[in-house]
Image (cartoon, rainbow, N blue to C red):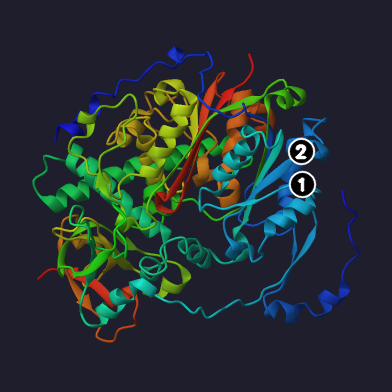
Amino acid sequence: MTARPPAYSKFRDAQAELERSGSVLFRDAEGNESLIIKFPYSINYIHSYAEDSPFFLGLAEGRLRGSKCRKPKCGFVFATPRSHCMVCGAPTEWIDLPLKGRLHSWTTCHFGSEAFLKETPYNLALVEFDGVGSVLLARLKDCVESDLYVGMPVEARFDPNPKYSITDIWFVPAR
Amino acid sequence: MPSRSSSRSNAKAKPRASAPKRPLTPVSKGRRVYMVTGGVTKFAKAHPSMDFRLMVKRAYDYAAKGIPNLTADRIDGTRISYFSDHFARQLKAASMVQDYLGMNPKGSVRIEWGGATGGECFQAAYEAVASGRMDVCLGAGFETMSRVQTWKGNEFIALASDTNFDFPLGGFYTGYYALMVNRHIYEYLRLGKFADVKDEREAQRLAIEEGSRIMSMVSVKNHLNALHNPYAQYPKRLTVDDVLRSEMISYPLTREQICTMSDGAAVVVLCSEERAKEFTDKPIRVIGVGTGTDTMRLADRPFGKVPLMPHERPKDYENLRYPGVHSFRAGRAAGLEAYRMAGITNPNRQLDFIELHDAYASSEIQTYEDLGLCKYGEGYSFVERGDPFLKEIDYGFPVPEAGAIPVNPSGGLIACGHPVGATGLMQAVFAFWQLQGTIPKHFGDPALQLHKPVRGAIHSHAGTGSAVTVSILERGYR
């Protein structure tokens, strides 16, 4: 057992003010007191899309671009781009993907992380395309949970005011 | 589809009495490694009166308590794990654990591998001993997730998904696991049990309803088991309906099917054979370790063939495109490596229990299949049959084959909590106590103690199945 410290009167004098800033004196079941403080932590990152840049620039032009392995014997086509082939290691080239596909899987998120809570509920979809070896994760709009099923035909839409984010493209049920 | 309708063929339950009690013959070029003790703090939403150093110290003191001659000077070095620098907001937090425990100037390294951080720490400690570099290695892990609100915490966790292509869509792991289980339900229930339903939407609706009901049985099991585990964060008595009616988080996953954020710590002590004998007459041997990986992005998971367990045949999976997003290839790879090393050819017969990474009730079912407890596609019927349940506990629904191979007898992550860097080590400690037969002593309750288990597995899993570890523990004494 550690000796109980004497009461800290200075904190209590200023308690109301400190609590407004988020600080509290927490007392547990054994009577131990812990001082909990709160402070902000934010940062602006400098982030390059680097070799993936053509994908994000393409979205702004209304183009959905994937990657095709340059090695003729391989030729794997990726819906989510990468500059080197995951199957054989050869460089890939940019290709235009079809703008129509099908739901490989889907969900409706009723919560999200803090940055996206205000957008809930939102739908996520893994979209598969004919002749493409992998799929693409995207938002799915203009539909509700009860409309959705695996295999449902969907088509792409692009943000007319691009933010240069993966959210510049989304899918809707095919007309 | 013959491959999927074969679900029933393997469905015969095996009597546990047939489980071989003799030790297996592990295949490893390394030295023999034994676990001699372990300790865990109670996992909680927050521990405002303990920082991460004190949490680890408490777990360490508990571990050392039973072994008077295990003093700090007899430990050669440490491996310390925590997942997130964002949660810690303290880089090199492991250095502060090391000095708090009085371990300077011994060697140490911080281990991080997403959700599998604790499992990797266990194996890093194993490797330190197996390689001959150390005779006694302390593995310690912790996480302090209470430092931000839950939804900010979800954001931190989702930073372990591709920040160009995945994170900006919602930054939400539960969403990713919901995508995976919806496809799993499609592959194995829509194309299985509901194959004859003509209307596509109706068939899928029925399949999801059925899958959700069975996932809820897993949640009931783990929460109820935890009622007898004083270390668990959220033990509770629930019904399938309670689970189904709890808040929808990401369709079809409800709140009670998902683990929560936790603060907590756990430690293990691993040593060579000679040292183990000096510390305890009940050492537990680590007879197999395995790891596997998969692509960070779900969208990149390829479609290929299933790497087969010894008891599976290619024709079992003729029409199955694998792994896609429905199964965890990393889990299968980790299981295969660990089983091969341990000499396990039929895990369902040769393991007495598994503590596995049930961050979601869905991933527990997917993991049964990855680890070969049943074939791919049989996970749902495996639950309904009751194989992973405990025989002595009343779950409120029939579990005819209960006790066949108990999974998460401790309550798992869903009920115990998931302080990431500690979780895989917590599983090791619970498995260690099971194999020693000391659960009644440590839990103050005999209900979860299995009858003389010989061998168990622990399984730790990182973000959407991008990495998995499996370790096999066996009673190392007669």
How many other residues sit within 10 Å of disc 1, few (<14), some (14-19) or many (≥20)?
Answer: few
Q: Secondary structure at mark 1?
A: loop
As displayed, is residue B230 above or below residue A154? above
Mark 1 belongs to which amino acid?
A: Lys
The answer to whether B5 appears left or right of B393 in the picture is left
The answer to whether B211 appears left or right of B85 in the picture is left
Quadrant (top left/top right/bottom left/bottom right) for the N terminus of chain B: top left
Task: Please report, as a chain letter, where disc 1 is located.
Answer: B
Visible residue check, residue B56: yes
Of A48 and B276, the residue lying toward us? A48
Q: Position of residue A154 (x, y in %)?
A: 16, 66
| Label number found at residue B75 | 2
Residue at 78% across / 35% down in the picture?
A: B65
Of A118 and B356, the residue lying toward us? B356
Residue to which mark 1 is pinned: B106
Q: Give the label, 1 or 2, closer to the camera.
A: 1
Question: Disc 1 versus disc 2: distance between alpha carbons?
Answer: 8 Å
